[in-house]
Image (cartoon, rainbow, N blue to C red):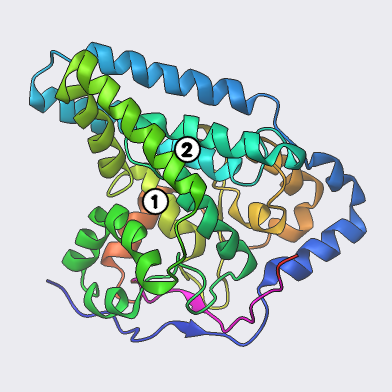
Amino acid sequence: MGNRVTREDFEWVYTEQPHTQRRKEILAKYPEIKTLMGPDPHLKWIVSGMVFMQLLACYLVKDLSWKWIFFWAYAFGGCINHSLTLAIHDISHNVAFGNKQAKWNRWFAIFANLPIGIPYSASFKKYHIDHHRYLGGDSLDVDIPTDFEGWFFCTPLRKLLWLFLQPLFYSLRPLYVNPKAITRMEILNALVQFSIDLIIYYLWGLKPVIYLIAGTILCLGFHPISGHFIAEHYMFLKGYETYSYYGPLNWLTFNVGYHMEHHDFPSIPGCRLPMVKKIAAEYYDNLPHHQSWIRVLWDFVFDDTLGPYSRVKRLCKLAKES
């Protein structure tokens, strides 16, 4: 089982998140960064192509044996589905159609959700705004593991199990940490999603439905792309709570690896975040960052100083809604 990790609580800090101040400084020095804000005109076409690719895959896998269903779910379909969850992440910041067309973004996120097999987009939007506004906020940021997760998943084998179970914890944690009323958009998201699932089942049987859902669960769990879940905010170095990754997997994940840049400027679409780093290089080049998401997963499992407790937490005051 390995040795228990030494950390027995989160890293509590009593300062504001660093992104607010850095954003002010960068915009004061480089006001041209404001021109990078706004919608990505290519996003809707890329996402639509991915959705239709998965619908084609549903037809192609309908007669495969179960072992090949799960193989292609992990090796291909799940990679697309994980990428679509990150497209939904971008869309949640209104970068598909812009802030003036917020409803179009919400409906397009539901469309992007279709191959994922499980309604996700509306609930993600509801909680993701808190992750940015209250980064590390106790009982507010549901990206932070619970005390039980930190206490129990404390050995290499248990941490490995925790990585496999990430989709379960991300689904259930909000209901325990910061429950919110179900919204109309969440109901619509579920109705549309389950209707499409039933249509696929009616046309091609159970295997394509399992292909979609299994791919989502497997590739949001223990998978190289899932290294971003750990890389983004787990404290690999004391005093740093957000990390970027500049490797090739950004091509598959809408540049989610540019995570410091994203939290500094959440209204800038992923395709333009490399330009932020280039313009304000002196703010990012000397900050710690990751070279490999696979190495992140390896270190997380086998480094006794790392675990679900390796997160910065802070007490946050609720912002007034405008």
The answer to which quarter of the image holds residue 197 is top left
- Left or right: where 133 falls relative to 136: right
Q: Is residue 311 magenta?
A: yes
The answer to which quarter of the image holds residue 298 is bottom left
Quarter of the image with the C terminus in it:
bottom right
Number of marks in picture? 2
- Left or right: where 285 falls relative to 238: right
Magenta stretch bounds = 308-320
Q: For the residue labelled by badge 1, is the local secondary structure a helix, a strand or a loop? A: helix
Marks 2,1: beta carbons within 8 A: yes
Which sits in the foreground, 209 or 135? 209
Quarter of the image with the N terminus in it:
bottom left
Disc number placed over residue 264 in the picture, else none: none
Crowd tier of the residue under label 1, counting other residues whose Cα lies within 10 Å: few below 14, some 14–19, many 20 or above: many
* Identity of the residue drawn at 30% across and 17% down: 57
**x and y percentages locating residue 181 in the rendered image:** 46, 63
Vertical placement of residue 50 versus 93, above or below: above
Q: For the residue labelled by badge 2, is the local secondary structure a helix, a strand or a loop? A: helix
Q: Mark 2 or 1 closer to N-term?
A: 1
Crowd tier of the residue under label 2, counting other residues whose Cα lies within 10 Å: few below 14, some 14–19, many 20 or above: some
**x and y percentages locating residue 266 in the rendered image:** 68, 52
Residue wearing tag 2: 249
* Identity of the residue drawn at 14% across and 23% down: 68
The answer to which quarter of the image holds residue 105 is top right
User: What amino acid is at disc 2?
Assistant: Leu
Res. 206 visible in picture: yes
**x and y percentages locating residue 217 in the rendered image:** 27, 43
Q: Is residue 195 magenta?
A: no
- What is the C-alpha distance between the residues marked 2 and 1? 10 Å
User: What amino acid is at disc 1?
Assistant: Gly
